[in-house]
Image (cartoon, helix red, strand yellow):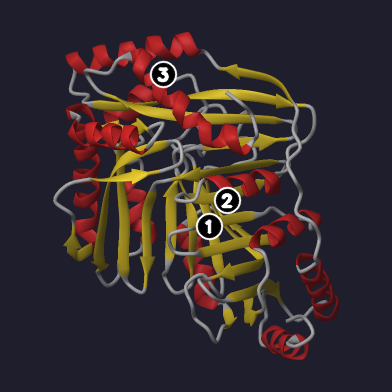
């Protein structure tokens, strides 16, 4: 791609720059040969910038962002303003090509930000380079802010950086030696679950989702590409994501899509209610059937379905909702799962729906504000981006978001993992603790840490 389209790209960039009196976003997309998205991500560590990774196995779709951030925006309105004036070359117009913003946000406003100091409340980032992998095709997008000054040096720098991203370097293999593993305030967390059940029995609060953390220390600096490789190998039915800000990288493998929009069609996933996988096929089937019949889990699941469908119906039509939940079977866990689809109404946007949905009852509780107030006042954990929407959106109003659970924050030689569960009036603190222990497993396995 670099040599084949070099002349056309230079001509396009110069023409765009000459016409402008101020900096604008210029975006160039071309179809390229196959390249390993994980290698593209790993090569991005050599550039001065922060990286992004998104993979949906169900859709066989991958997005990787690398290189310096062209724009770091704090609101969806800023993104819309940038796109309105952008100069775009994109003959494919395929979802996820052209200008793409990788997005993320806080679970809720927090007074203190020590662990998550590199992660802003809200972020929409356009990286210098994006690799898009669809089922059979690969595209590279170059994004730049240009004006008529220094255009020659800018072109040279862009092409040199792109050469680095296409290098046939080895992907780092994770080689970790664990020094310490600490489950933060485990007994205090069980007492908090008991306090939550007492509160639910005596107030209007119906459900609250409580989270806890595990801190790991290693001998050497953790390589995000190596952890992603392990997640891709082991968590086949999840959304694999990574967001790198400064020295920290937030990554994970979540089973829970929040909202996807493509060509005006909306898809969402109601996931709530959890059980472990069985030791064999027969055992697994028994556990799954018990989950489908369990009144606590069915009630928790129905909270989520009702809230999500109530919100989506404001922005869409032709809503399709199955009569009852299915089983979503992952490597270590199985969940109650209800997929929902609809047709987006004109003028509605992915960002609007995400803002109103977050947090769903599966991540916050019900009623929403009462649950959030309880979490803010009682939970000692600094959640940051854990449990909040992460994803992407493009200039054609396509996009995808997932809820950032089954996740961890890497920073140097340290990893902090997060897990949560829904607490209702009949919840047992010991059982909820065990459920969160199971939810740590995907990240522990990716970090090659035995339980």
Q: Label 1 vs label 2: CA separation?
A: 9 Å
Residue 244 is left or right of residue 86, and the answer is right
Residue 433, numbered circle: 3
Q: Earlier in the sequence, mark 3 or mark 1?
A: 1
Res 360 quadrant in image: top left
- Relative image position of residue 325 (x, y in whole percent): 22, 45
Residue 232, numbered circle: 2
Residue 254 is left or right of residue 298, and the answer is right
Of residue 14 and residue 440, the one placed in the foreground of this image is: 440
Residue drawn 80% across the image and 65% down it? 168
Residue drawn 57% across the image and 50% down it? 232
Residue for badge 1: 55
Q: Secondary structure at mark 1?
A: strand
Residue drawn 56% across the image and 27% down it? 112
Q: Label 3 vs label 1: CA separation?
A: 30 Å
Give above or below for 362 relative to 86. above
Give above or below for 382 relative to 99. above
Give above or below for 176 relative to 78. above
Q: Are marks 1 and 2 in contact (CB under 8 Å)?
A: yes
Q: Is residue 393 visible?
A: yes
């Amino acid at each position: 791609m670099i040599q084949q389209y070099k002349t056309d790209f230079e001509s396009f960039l110069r023409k765009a720059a000459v016409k402008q009196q101020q900096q604008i976003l210029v975006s160039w997309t071309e179809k390229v040969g196959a390249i390993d998205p994980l290698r593209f991500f790993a090569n991005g560590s050599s550039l001065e910038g922060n990286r992004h990774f998104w993979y949906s196995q169900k859709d066989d779709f991958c997005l990787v962002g690398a290189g310096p951030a062209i724009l770091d925006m704090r609101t969806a309105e800023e993104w819309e303003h940038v796109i309105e004036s952008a100069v775009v070359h994109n003959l494919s117009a395929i979802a996820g090509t052209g200008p793409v913003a990788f997005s993320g946000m806080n679970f809720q406003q927090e007074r203190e930000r020590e662990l998550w100091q590199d992660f802003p409340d809200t972020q929409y980032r356009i990286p210098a380079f994006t690799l898009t992998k669809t089922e059979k095709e690969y595209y590279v997008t170059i994004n730049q802010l240009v004006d008529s000054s220094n255009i020659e040096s800018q072109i040279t720098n862009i092409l040199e950086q792109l050469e680095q991203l296409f290098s046939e370097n080895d992907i780092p293999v994770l080689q970790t030696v664990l020094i310490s593993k600490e489950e933060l305030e485990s007994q205090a967390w069980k007492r908090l679950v008991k306090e939550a059940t007492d509160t639910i029995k005596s107030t209007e609060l119906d459900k609250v989702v409580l989270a806890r953390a595990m801190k790991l220390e290693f001998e050497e600096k953790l390589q995000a590409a190596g952890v992603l490789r392990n997640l891709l190998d082991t968590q086949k039915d999840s959304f694999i994501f990574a967001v790198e800000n400064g020295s920290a990288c937030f990554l994970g493998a979540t089973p829970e899509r929040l909202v996807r929009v493509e060509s005006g069609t909306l898809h969402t996933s109601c996931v709530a209610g959890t059980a472990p996988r069985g030791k064999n096929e027969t055992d697994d089937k028994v556990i799954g059937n018990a989950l489908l019949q369990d009144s606590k889990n069915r009630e928790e699941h129905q909270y989520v379905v009702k809230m999500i469908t109530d919100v989506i119906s404001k922005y869409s039509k032709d809503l399709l909702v199955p009569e009852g939940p299915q089983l979503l079977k992952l490597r270590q866990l199985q969940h109650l799962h209800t997929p929902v689809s609809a047709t987006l109404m004109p003028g509605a946007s992915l960002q609007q729906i995400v803002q109103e949905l977050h947090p769903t009852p599966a991540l916050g509780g019900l009623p929403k504000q009462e649950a959030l107030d309880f979490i803010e006042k009682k939970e000692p954990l600094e959640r940051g981006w854990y449990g909040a929407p992460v994803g992407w959106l493009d200039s054609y109003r396509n996009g995808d978001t997932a809820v950032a659970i089954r996740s961890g924050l890497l920073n140097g030689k340290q990893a902090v993992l997060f897990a949560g569960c829904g607490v209702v009036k009949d919840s047992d603190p010991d059982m909820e603790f065990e459920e969160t222990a199971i939810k740590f497993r995907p990240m522990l396995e990716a970090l090659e840490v035995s339980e």
